[in-house]
Each structure stands twice: as C-alpha cells, then as structure tokens.
Amino acid sequence: MNILGIGIVFTGGCGIDAYENALIKGFNAEDNNLFVYSVDLDRIKDKNLWKKLRRADKFSKMAVLAAADAATNSAVLHMDKKRLGIIVSSAFGPQVTTFDFLDGLLDYGEVNVSPTVFSNSVHNAASSYIAGVLGVHGPCLTITQFYFSFQTALQMAGVWLDEERCDYCLVGAVDQYGEVLGYIQNHKLSLAEDGRIKPFNFKPTYQIPAEGSVFFLVSKNKTDNTFCKIESICFNKNNLDNNVDVDLNIIDADGAMADESAYLSAISPKIPTAAYAPLFGSMMIGSAFNCTAGALMLKNQAYYKNPVTDNPHGINLLQDQGSSSIERISCIRYNCNTENAIIHLKRA
Amino acid sequence: MSDNKTKELIEIREKLKIMLVENLSLEDINPDDIKTDEPLFGEGLGLDSLDAVEIVVMLQRNFGLEVKDMNKGKEIFYSIDTLADYVYENTKNKS
C-alpha cells in the first residue's frame, strides 16, 4: 500500500511542513528544553473544524486534526466516503478523560457524572469524531495496544485494502499526556533533565513524556503526491543486521523503556541508523512519528540528520543531511520482551 | 423586588454564564456576551439536547438541584434569566 497523505500534530506544531521544518532544523536545546512535549491546540487556526469538535476532548481533537490534515495533504479530491476506512491506534486510549470520569464518579456519585466526559472516555470516540467531521461511512476501528499499536493498525489497513473492504484508509496513532501518565513515567523511568532524549544510550535511558498524533492516508492507488510505499510490516523478525539492501534504519529508542539494549542487535555497522524521538518526545506510539520521518525522506530523496548524536556504543549513525538516492528505510521498534516490529518503507 | 433579591439574582446569572461556558466548552463565547434574556437553545446560544443533559448535571453538582420533569425543564432552561430564577427560588426554599 502507498502513503498518499500525512497529517501530524506534535509539540512543534501541526502539519507535515512543521514536522519537516523540525527535522531540517534539528534539536534545539532552547526550543526543546521542556519536561513535557505537549501539544498546544490553541495554535490551531482552523476554526471551522473546531466548531465540530466543541464537545471533544484533547485526545479526539488531536486525532481529528491529524486525520483531516492527512486527507487534505493527500490532495485526493474524489474519494467515495463509503470506501474510506478509519483505524485509530493508541497505547493508552483517552486515559485523561477516563480518569476525569472516574474522578467525577468519586466526587459526585454515579448520578452526577458528566455525560459528555463519559462519551469521550469511550475508546472509539476519536474514530467516531473523525468519521463525523470528515463524513466517512466506511469501516471504523480503534486498536489499543501497549507497544505495537501503530504497526498493528498498519497491518490491519493493509488487510482491509487487500480484501477490498475499502479503497482508502485513514490510519494513525494518537496518545495524550496526562498527570497520571507523567507521574508513572517519571517515577518508573529517568527524566531527561537536560531536555535531551539520547536515543543511542540504550542503558541507562532518559525520557521526556509527550503527546501527539500522526495519520496516514493509505491506498493501493498511487498519486503524484505519494510519499512512499509500505512494503511490509513484520513482527519478531530475526537476523535484522543481514538486511543490507536497506539504506537507513530508524529506531524507536526514546527512553520509554529502562533498558533499550535490544536495539543493539538490530543495528548493522553497514547501515546508518537514525532516531528522531528528541524532536517529538517519548511515546509508545513514537513509531508513527519516526515512520513519518522515513516517508518524508523517501519522498524528498533527502536525509535528515540525527537530532541528538550522543553515541557511547560507537554505532554507525546517520551523519549527513541533504539529497541522496534512498530506496528503502526500515523503522524498527522493540518492546521490553525484546520482541520487534519492523515497518519496511520503499520509494514509490 | 427587594435589593437583596436583585443582587443575588445578578450574582447567580453571572455564575451561570461562567458555568455554561466552562462546562459546555463554549470556547469562542465570552460569558459577558451572553444576553440573559436570549434563548439558550436553538437560535439563541445554539445549545442542543446533549447540552441540556449537561446543564442538569451542572445544576445538581453546583446547587444541589434536581430537574426530573423535562417538560418543566424546557421552561427553566429557556434563558439565563429563567435558569437564575429557578436556582434562586429553589436554593432559597432549601435554606
């Protein structure tokens, strides 16, 4: 399947141009020296979209913004909305709203809980908002999984397209920062107090909690705007370093696990390695953001340098920035049980 | 109308306006811009039936008032003025 459009909401702004600018600019200690990489929705200018999202929580708003942005970015004008699917993936779902609902129960009892908060705490709320705002009548699904939710969603989108369940699919990832998540993350893991996530440290690791959303419009069809092809999504593949026909490995190391040494087994001295988490933060759905960087590189045929290059293991890091011939990029994620998931991207 | 009642009603109206904006996420609306006699639903402020349920919860939480009869609710929820009158009368009766 092909990526025809990308929408993104992250701490650096909204839209693929904002993300590309962040990749080109690289890590800036002044911009990024924060303890949470949060999304400022007040910066979003599209008031028409906003009116349709009055009752939505931040989780759903980020998802709708990214999904709508992906549809617009694709420039596909004539899409049968009955043949457009939606798959939302998340590690935690709308956990901030769920905690708000629980607080409401404790504070006011079950009779006086806000019905709006309850409806937003339902896991499929974000995909329903996307369907409502964009007028989509195709299949609609939410996948909540701790480590590989985005990869699973992409795999499902591939199945839907192969089985002709739909012609296009908006597939994406969203997670929201909240006090509870921040508390757990900062107590179980080490906070990068200097504001720099060091993806190649592997152990000890340093993280910065974050939030955001990425959506792809994918299809079997190809357009002039196609970013790249998603060649395959593999789980638990061995002998990763033998895969020498890959031009770049992007790893999801971001300090969100206390020990990320498993990535060392995926790194080949022959293939340059990159990781872009310092630009968007530590998130279980970080794969979607790294995958977006890979898609941009394949479309633009240009590399974006590593934002943070602390390299205690002396691995072959991507050093260059600028034009190059790029055919294949692998986006690699490990979980704490050293299981992996790889998204193989290929030039369109 | 006594000065005390007038003063209390003004306070309740201001409180209700702020509550509506906050609880119903009326982000583009300033509480001061809500006219106290304009309809809350339909062509006035543009609220809908889901907002009505949220207002019921708001009254229960903040004033301890229950609106069980939705036919009566139509009259009570007509405007900020009618809502404030209901809150004033019923909190007065309670105390």
Image (cartoon, coloured by chain):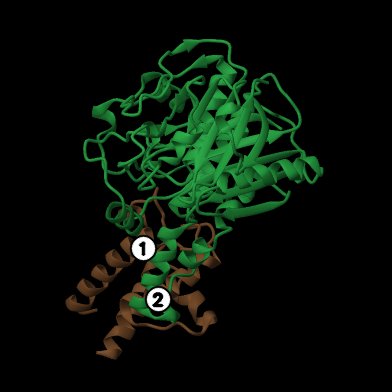
Chain colours: A green, B brown
Q: Can residue A48 be seen?
A: no
- The crowd level at tag 1 (other Cα within 10 Å; few <14, some 14-19, many 20+) is some
The residue carrying mark 2 is: A105
- Secondary structure, mark 2, is helix
Q: Residue at x 48, y 53 (%)?
A: A54
Instruction: Point out which mark residue A206 bears.
Output: none
Question: What amino acid type is highlighted by mark number 2?
Answer: Leu
* Residue A151 position within the rendered picture, expressed as x and y whole percent measured from the top left: 59, 43
The residue carrying mark 1 is: B36
Q: Could you tell whether A110 is left or right of A81 in the image?
A: left
Does A46 sit above or below residue B58?
above
Q: Could you tell whether B3 is left or right of A313 in the image?
A: left
Between circles 1 and 2, the one closer to the viewer is 2
Report how many numbered discs are placed on residues in the image: 2
- The crowd level at tag 2 (other Cα within 10 Å; few <14, some 14-19, many 20+) is some
Q: Farthest residue to the right: give it.
A: A164
Does A315 sit above or below residue A102?
above
Q: Could you tell whether A74 is left or right of B88 in the image?
A: right
- Secondary structure, mark 1, is loop
Q: Can residue A315 be seen?
A: yes
Q: Which residue is drawn at 69% across and 46% down?
A: A156
Looking at the rendered image, the quarter that the C terminus of chain A falls into is: top right
Question: What amino acid type is highlighted by mark number 1?
Answer: Thr
* Residue B90 position within the rendered picture, expressed as x and y whole percent measured from the top left: 33, 85
Disc 1 from disc 2: Cα separation: 32 Å
Q: Farthest residue to the left: give it.
A: B3
Chain letter for mark 1, please: B
